[in-house]
Image (tube, coloured by chain):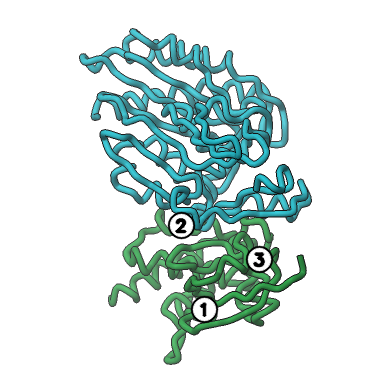
Amino acid sequence: MAEKGSRARAMAGGTDILVQLRGGRFKIDRLVDIKGVPEMNQLSCSTAEGLTLGAAVPCYRIYEDQTIQKMYPGLVDAAFIIGGIQIQGRASVGGNLCNASPSGDTIPALIALGAICVIEGPKGRRTLPVEDFCVAPGKNAMEDGELLVALQFPPPAPRSGAHYLRFIPRNEMDIAVAGSGVSVVLDEDRQHIKSARISLAAVGPTPIFAREAGDLLAGKEANEESFEAAAEAAKAAARPITDMRGTIKQRVHLSGVLTKRALRKAVARAKEA
Amino acid sequence: MSEKIHVRTQINGSDVDFLCENRQSLLEVLRDVLDMTGTKEGCNDGNCGACTVIVDGTLIDSCLMLGVEAQGKSITTIEGVASPDGLHPIQQAFLENAALQCGICTPGFIVAAKALLEREPDADEGRIRHWLAGNLCRCTGYDKIVRAVLDAGQTMRGN
């Protein structure tokens, strides 16, 4: 890949890149199937180490894994709604991230969960928080010759919960008009929020990390009033465009509604955790 | 680019060798190289599910897999669904429920339904509709298809 530079691309499930190549979106000389690399197919999950998710692991392996269902339901939410069953049989979370679409469903979930990209390249290995990975529509922070190897998730904090949800006009098989991924950690009393992270899909040129919206929840009681305040901050962080999927007004509104709903569910999960 | 690659795979239980170009999809290989035209091309970009096949137990769109990736895999296509004794219960149920009109989407639906019912023979209507969301039909309105899969599930459970 280093030899071909920008004329080489990695392929995991191929559900985006084969369509893009056929559509002539870009031209390459080399397509490298990375599914044979053991590290990229790795899926290891433990309460001590957290989750290491190889970049080529398809969605179905994530949502069918009972340990991940228990520890990272917010990630399962996203992996379970990408495309249909056929797409989930091939499409990887790593590929969804590298594709860097503003509407990529897994990306807000990754950001909310504090996932870190492990990137390998000619100059060695480096790490990058997911919120810094997408730099423009379809563009990520990797240089030519670099490759996303895995995503690393910290072990879930005690009394934590996460949720991702999106708005689509159909029931399945659609691209988000807007999406919101949140994670919360509750205080020992399980009534107050210790910390929160909120991230939005499809309301900006990249997935948005709404840091202020999450930060303002710290120390607040986990109730509707707090959720409303965070939803308003999420709306302020949204910078959508009007296109065939939705208008600016609708998407800003959705950012608030989805954030509020995601917070309700994440807090409910945290109370049970 | 036009140099052909030798691939050895298993399709519907038989060993198969073929030559394909590195950019050909599994769908193109099935239809154009192996003359297995039961698998249909609809959208060719992963939306419609007409080209659905099972690869090593996983349901996929064959338009989104390269032919060269079939090396060492085990593939089930619509041609492998019926047995020498007769139609598969899902195929029979599609006939009895008139669950097809133009028929282009049918092989994909049947292969997808087979993958579901083999792992969850008691799948309910909600589960069936969710599972088949990656298969589009522009004729039937889906209701007869869902009823056919429910009926087939009942048959396969031995009721």
Tell me which residue sits at (56%, 72%) in the image: B107
- x and y percentages locating residue B81 in the rendered image: 47, 79
Task: List the residue tagged with mark 1.
Answer: B11
Marks 3/1 in contact by CB < 8 Å: the verdict is no
Q: Nearer the viewer, residue B28 or B78?
A: B28
Vertical relation: B62 (above or below) A182: below
Give me the chain that's green. Answer: B
Compared across the picture, whether A3 is left or right of A86 comes to right
**Mark 3 and mark 2: span between their CA atoms?**
24 Å
Vertical relation: A54 (above or below) B148: above
Answer few, some or many: residues within 10 Å of disc 1's Cα (few below 14, many 20 plus, some between 14 and 19): many
Tell me which residue sits at (50%, 42%) in the image: A149
What amino acid is labelled 3 in the image? Ser
| Res B140 seen here | no
What amino acid is labelled 1 in the image? Ile
Vertical relation: A268 (above or below) B124: above
**Mark 1 and mark 2: span between their CA atoms?**
24 Å
Q: Nearer the viewer, mark 1 or mark 2?
A: 1
Task: List the residue tagged with mark 2.
Answer: B131
Where the N terminus of chain B falls, by quadrant? bottom right
Tell me which residue sits at (41%, 29%) in the image: A113
Of the numbered discs in the image, which one, if any, rests on residue B34? none
- x and y percentages locating residue A63 in the rendered image: 39, 47
Label 2 chain ID:
B
Q: Nearer the viewer, mark 3 or mark 2?
A: 3
Where the C terminus of chain B falls, by quadrant? bottom left
